[in-house]
Image (tube, rainbow, N blue to C red):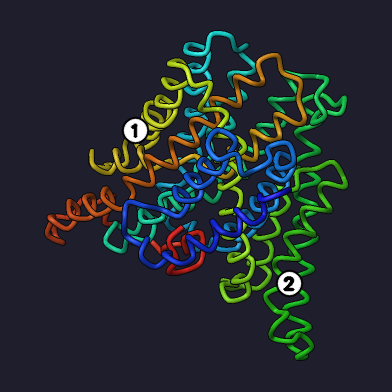
Amino acid sequence: MEWSLALVALALLGVAAVSRRLSGTPVTAAMLFVAFGLLVGPEVLDGVDVSSSSAAVRTLAEATLALVLFSDASRIDLGALRRTVGVPVRLLGIGLPLTIALGAVAAAAVLGELSAEEAVILAVVLAPTDAALGQAVVTEPRVPQRIRQGLNVESGLNDGICVPLLFAAVAFADVESEISGGRSPGTLLLEEIGYGILGGVAAGLLIAAIVTQAGRRDLIAPAWRQVVPAAGAALAYGIASALDGSGFIAAFVAGMVFRLALGRDPEELNRLTEEVGSVLNGVTFVLFGAVLLGPALSELSWQLALYSLLSLTVVRMLPVVVAMWGSRARRPTLGFLGWFGPRGLASIVFAVIVIEESQLPHEHLLVLAIYLTVGLSVLAHGLTAAPLAGRYARWYEQHPREKAPPMESAPAEVTRPRGPVGHAT
């Protein structure tokens, strides 16, 4: 790999050296990783060998997403969520389907070469949000709890929801894809979900039993306790993949089952999983900038730029407004919820899957749109997260407690944000 490994290590060291100073600033770690990737990529310094790094992007991205999904799921208190479901249920139950539908319409209109099926695939790939790219939004304590909870839970759940939708959409559009394996879209969907749930339940119960039973007998050395959840996420992914199910669904289900079986938030146990996930996330964004985004920028067109802008604005914001209809949310809240739907890790993983496992006629155009949208999101949402979170918080604080907006001021138990506590991500 020549200098690739050294350059990636240098990027991690550089961000680590200034990580504390990044907190609360318009500069995020993801921005620095992508910028470094662009700098050392083939379009500038040519320090990363694209041919030897392309396969590594998928491996790293899939491993990262599996760990992130497991951690996200184990972070969610279903009991508390049932008491404050309003915002995330609206965003996921109404907003997500509308985002996919509107994204497909926009893709068909702006990128006229795409078939209807390809437009749907593009919309599904860009539907999941990544709250970690706007970490200041979900960690700013002055932002109403219910709004932070809504965005955080939405980000934790929507990538898992979109996995089977993506596989079914690709199978429907391309019967010769490796994803379908000759299976009909209906069969594929059932197997992806069914085997994914099976692998997740099995792994989640096993690691919960190990933590409780072996822990009760003092059989686990302290240094190994945090290895159990990470290994459990890998086990869930491996079981589902071996059965031709969705490893991502399995990782997510395993996290949920693990927390339910434990009966508490496994925050301390998950520390290694979250730290490793954050490191792999950084490596993924370096390679994304060098291997994927850099070459895509050389093919930028006004149609691709327009679709990227639409995807991050109208395609996201209009469905959010519709989803929140009747909730009594104020206009600043609608704008805040609508704008902070960053596209990140899940979209990168889905794009790489589409490249390697399908034979779509306009595959190249699809991935260009995905890469450019994610790249723009890293920049735009990173730059605006801290300033707009502060501005929204000041708007909320201007209302006396007795006159606070009713929807925004409803109490909620905040789910822990993605990433290591106290780190800028």
Q: Which is more toward the observer, 256 or 223?
A: 223
Q: Mark 1 points at which residue?
A: 321
Residue mark closest to the camera, 2 vs 1: 2
Task: First in sequence, mark 2 or 1: give its number.
Answer: 2
SS class of the residue under badge 2? helix
Quadrant of the rendered image containing residue 24: bottom left
Q: Please, what is the three-letter code of the amino acid marked with disc 1?
A: Val
Residue furthest out toward the bottom: 218
Label 2, residues with CA under 10 Å away: few <14, some 14-19, many ≥20:
many
Q: Quote the CA–CA distance across marks 2 and 1.
A: 41 Å
Is residue 162 depicted above or below 212 in this figure? Answer: above
Q: Please, what is the three-letter code of the amino acid marked with disc 2?
A: Val
Relative to 163, 110 lies left or right: left
Residue 341 at what x, y percent from top left? 43, 41
Q: Mark 2 points at which residue?
A: 228
Q: Which is more toward the observer, 37 or 26?
A: 37
Is residue 269 depicted above or below 379 in this figure? Answer: below
Quadrant of the rendered image containing residue 187: top right
| Residue drawn at the location 76% of the way across and 47% of the way down | 196
Residue 9 at what x, y percent from top left? 60, 59
Residue 195 at what x, y percent from top left? 81, 46
Residue 95 at what x, y percent from top left? 45, 34
Label 1, residues with CA under 10 Å away: few <14, some 14-19, many ≥20:
some
Residues at discs 2 and 1 in contact (Cβ within 8 Å): no
| Residue drawn at the location 68% of the way across and 35% of the way down | 352
Q: Which is more toward the observer, 53 or 127?
A: 53
SS class of the residue under badge 1? helix
